Image: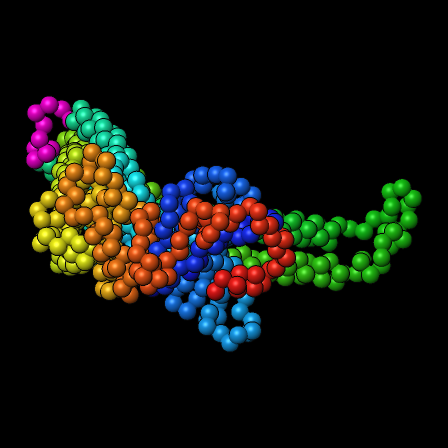
Amino acid sequence: MAITLKHLRVSGPGLVPAVASFDGHRTLIHGPSDTGKSHIWDCIWFLLGGTGTLEQFPESEGYDLLELAFLNDEHEYLVLKAMAGGAARVLVRRDDIWVVAGAPNPLEDVAQELGELLVKLSGAEGKKVLRTRSEKGAITGDDLRHWALLSQPGMISRDATKGKGHGSDKRVSSYSLFLSGLDDSAVELYKSSSFKEQAKGKLAVAESELARLQGLIPAGTGRASTVAALARVDERLDMLTTQLQARSSVLKELRQQIAAEGGALASALTQLASATAICERFTLLDMKYLSDLARLGATDEGIAFFQALEETTCPLCGTPVEHHLDPSDLKPRAPKKYRDAIAAEAEKIRELRRGLQPSVAHEEARIATATADVQRLTASLKALEEQETFVLRAAGQEFDADPRELAESHTRFSSWIDAFDEIDRLKGEIARLEQETKQKRTVLVRNVGSHGDEVGAIARQMLNDWGFMSIKSVYVDPAACDLVIDGRRRLSYGAGKRGLFLSAMTIALMQHALKEGHPHLGVVVLDSPLKAYAQKESADNMDRDIPTATVNASFYGWLSRFEGPGQIIVLENEAVDPATARALNAIEFTDDHTHGRQGFYPSKTVVAPPPAPASDGTEFDDFE
């Protein structure tokens, strides 16, 4: 993982681009002040996600587009950003950068945000660091820049390397990640202020509810006595229920008997009505038969009387009677035939009456039986109803407690018990919330193991190589994110040594992280690490025990031999031996229009035509 810076390019319409190419291991750009060295550091910071705007000066007038190329494994990335600011555009060559000459290998846009991309390429993706003791977050590009790019003011500052105020906790966390490879995923967070305020609000609500519940329970009432009282009420309610069930069973049986007797009575009444109706019809029929017999008897008597009369002429006309009647009716046998027919009809009716009598007797017997049944069932039903009335009246007399009062007592005691239980729960909740509103502050000690000693050993060897041969002990104070040299804190030294010691620690941290496979950006950019040590007039530089020339020569010599791991870019004012400069392939700014490279930006006397537009990324191939 990690990245390797390839080149920095600044362009503008009609202007010759300003370009600084970087070696894969070490690059030295040196020259006098005001030639653009610190501006190069600013541009790298800006293009690696730094905020703010770049300072403008006469040499940069007309330049508007910044470009930073860097490598990661077998892929090349290009970051484009306006000098005025705004979002960065990130491009990548998807194919391997080492392709046959002339083969197409276009640049494509990267959808990922620049800071997230750098975190991914540095191997820190998914790592968690403490932003504060109450908040975790992902590592950011700002953390990578802080421990990789050292400005001149930052090197000699007496401020802690982790910074101060907002963000210092995050700096310590990211430093520990680079140092040990372990993030803060397992660190227990402090409770945030908002969380505590929420807990206080919940605590106030719980205390208010507790006071309300305690007010519902009479003074001196305990849960045990309330449970006992509720048990007694339950017992009486059970007895009442048992009595009611027994009474209900008796009433149920009585009402079943009443229903049965009522049904039987209705059936008996139906039978009585039916028999009575039939008997009445039979009586009516018998009366009809008697009427018919009387009518037939009268008719027979009339015929007999007619037979006894003598024949006489008509008193009106004096004619014989046969002139007025059917002669056959005057024959002696005719009345007899009428009387015989009447006698036969009468006998038939009497026979019908004789046959009707058993049916009448049967229906009268049914009437008698049904009447007896109705009387018996009526009496039985009345007795059952009286018994039901007695049972209902007796039930009211047997219950020695008012069911309503028992129900109200049961409800009251149950609510008290619920209140007692809720009070117990609220007391536990209040105790928990009281703990949440306060938390014991503990010192966070990260277990970096031997990593601090290893970085210290790399830094000590580096400082010995830089000429500080008297240094015997160097180790890392992980809490301060800084070195302790021969028992002294780095910040206790003068400005010159502070800058060099911080440079040594930053480089050592990068080398150790890359060697161990820990996350790191993979590049260190140092702005004027030697300048402060060379300033003799500085009042903050009184402990310069090694000659400046020795330190400068040793530093540049060490840099010329540096082969990684990682990449070092040094921007420096101090002169370098020509042989060492050649070994370093150093970029020299002369601040002279007559020879060499004047500075980072070309002279405005040279004007180039505007570049032709291109969209496939091949316009950047000249800088590979």
The structure's colour scheme is rainbow
Q: How many marks?
A: 0
Q: Quadrant of residue 26?
A: bottom left
- Report the predominant secondary structure element of the magenta stretch: loop
Q: Quadrant of residue 469?
A: bottom left
Residue 107 lies left or right of residue 372; in this view the side is right
* Residue 78 appears left or right of 189: right
Nearer the observer, 296 or 317: 296
Q: Is residue 237 visible?
A: no
Q: Which residues are magenta?
A: 217-226
Q: In this view of the protein, can residue 74 be seen by the observer?
A: yes
Place of residue 313 in the rendered image (x, y in percent of width and height, measured from the top left): 86, 48
Residue 69 occupies quadrant: bottom left
Q: Residue at x 51, y 76 (%)?
A: 100
Q: Looking at the image, which residue is at 50% across and 43% down? A: 60
Residue 22, given in percent of the width and then of the height, sits at 40, 59
Horizontal and vertical percent position of residue 462: 19, 57
In the image, farthest residue toward the bottom:
100
Query: Residue at (19%, 45%) from the top-left corner?
Result: 497
Q: Quadrant of the N terminus?
A: bottom left
Asked if residue 219 is among those painted magenta in the image, a careful observer would answer: yes
Across and down, in percent, residue 570 comes to 33, 53
State the residue lying farthest toward the front: 594
Identify which residue, 545 or 69, lies in the foreground: 545
Q: Nearer the viewer, residue 231 or 53?
A: 53
Q: Which residue is at the front of the view, 329 or 498?
A: 498
- Relative side of 328 to 622, left or right: right
Q: Is 223 in the magenta? A: yes
Which residue does the image show at 10% across and 23% down from the upper left? 219
Q: Is residue 220 above or below residue 186?
A: above
